[in-house]
Image (cartoon, helix red, strand yellow):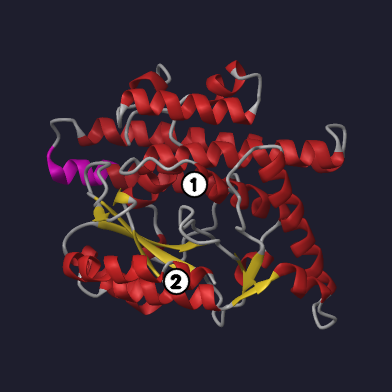
Amino acid sequence: MEISKKLLVYLFLLPILLFQNQCYLLYQGCGQFDILRRRRSIQKVIRDPKTSDFVKSKLIFVEEVRKFAKDRMKLKVRSTYKSISELDRDYLAVNVIASEKLAFRSKKWSFPIVGSVPYLGFFNRSHAKKAAEKLKKKGWDVRMQYVSAYSTLGWFNDPLISTQLSLSEWYLASLLIHECTHATLWFKGDVSFNESLASFVGRKGALQFYAEKFGKDSRMYRQRLKILANHKKRTLLYHKYANQLNQIYISSLSDTEKLKNKKRLLRELEKILVKQKFRKISQTTEERLNNADLTSYLRYNSKKFNFQSYFQKCEREWECFFRVIREEKKNLGLRTTSFSREGGPRLL
């Protein structure tokens, strides 16, 4: 049993984790264990006569994406997503992220294995709220974000989560490929690089999956191209306004003037996003855009790394692409200069 195989690792790490992070990692370890113990074989769930047709179709789709990621993209899928965990809540986890109010600098936390990360994850929503409130009182821009999925970076065979069945097939495909990318390549301490890479691979991989499954002339494929075009449009908006805000933050204006201009630009961005149906209208002050939102979005959609050029140089072959990325990153350590795209925002 996989949990038994990892028991010695837990016993070794637990005293270190408790010493470094008090009770936080113990709580999260219990949450992770709960997800693992709930796993059921997807094949058994599909064959179960009690399983609805909707769930069966989604699980069959997941198996198709998983096979594609393994066979066509050469991702290290192992036994990931061969099981599903049924949760008794309507969310998987909640991330708490924070940024300085007048700079795109995220608060970071350090942990074994993953290194420095710009978020705290919680399986309990009330715990996340408490952490968010503490950060707000200390003057940070804060956001609580519901997490659709995460990767244990190959330490465990991650299951599909019941809450993911409500996602669209397109989002689910890109999400699963995104997380399998993390299990294949993860550079400790460089979250911006890791998330931007996984986002690129997730979108490109899902598009290729749809092209091979339905054909490039199909309505399904053309709809996905439209989704990606809208995503690019949204990302350009975020980068445009982030650059404008950054110029204000580094200017000689007083903090009062900086905050005034920040509020104006963020409200302007909000209106555009709502008008173009990229965002719902903020119902409360707490929902208003802040620096935490922008740093988080740009972390997953950074323009510092020109992955497309490497993909093209490899003639769109994934095995070559991953090998080149690994070699380039190894040669550069944690520096990212050779991945920079001229003229792109360099905020993260």
- Start and end of the magenta stretch? 254-261
Residue 323, above or below 151: above
Image quadrant holding the N terminus, namely bottom right
Residue named by callout 2: 32
Residue 194 image offset from top left, x and y in percent: 43, 41
Camera-nearest residue between 265 and 168: 168
Residue 345 locus on image (x, y percent): 37, 28
Between 3 and 270, the residue placed more toward the observer is: 3
Q: Is residue 93 magenta?
A: no
Residue type highlighted by circle 1: His
Could you tell whether 212 is left or right of 111 in the image? right
Which callout, 1 or 2, points at the residue further toward the start of the chain? 2
Gap in angstroms between the C-alphas marked 1 and 2: 17 Å
Q: Which secondary structure lies at badge 2?
A: helix
Numbered mark located on residue 182 in the image? 1
Is most of the magenta stretch helix, strand or loop? Answer: helix
Q: At x 56% / y 83%, what residue is drawn?
A: 88
Q: Circle 2: is it few (<14), some (14-19), or many (20+) Cα within 10 Å?
A: some
Mark 1 and mark 2 residues within 8 Å of each other at the beta carbon: no
